[in-house]
Amino acid sequence: MKVWLLVLFLHTPDMPSIKYQAHLYKSEKECIFAKESYMEVYKNQSESYKKTLKTNANCLAFNSFPISYFSNANEI
């Protein structure tokens, strides 16, 4: 089973490290849609918000053991 992992990299200036969040998706299409939606929300934030929070998102594919949450997913 191929699974897609959306990893959000968040950086706040003057903080010691980069924070990240990860979300699983059963298809590349769903992952890319989530990534584009997230980046669009960030793009529409104020300039002061964007000065204090830098972000990026990436979709990564990997093979996984069957995940019960995705049991109805068609294998690609």
Image (tube, helix red, strand yellow):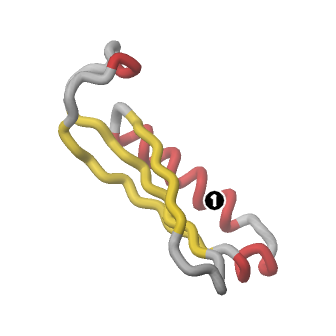
Q: Give residue 74's quadrant in the image.
A: top left
* Percent of width and height locating residue 18: 51, 72
73 and 22: which is toward the camera: 22
Q: Amino acid at mark 1?
A: Glu
Q: Residue 26, position in %: x, y? A: 35, 31
Residue in view at x 21 percent, y 34 percent: 64
Give the secondary structure at mark 1. helix
In the picture of the structure, the residue carrying the numbered disc 1 is 40
Crowding at mark 1 (Cα within 10 Å: few <14, some 14-19, many 20+)? few
Image location of residue 56, percent across then percent down: 51, 67
Q: Reply above or below: 75 against 27.
A: above
The vertical placement of 73 against 28, above or below, is above
Residue 10 sits in which quadrant? bottom right
Horizontally, residue 34 falls left or right of residue 59, namely right
Which residue shows up at 37% across the image and 53% down it?
59
- Residue 32, image x, y percentages: 43, 48
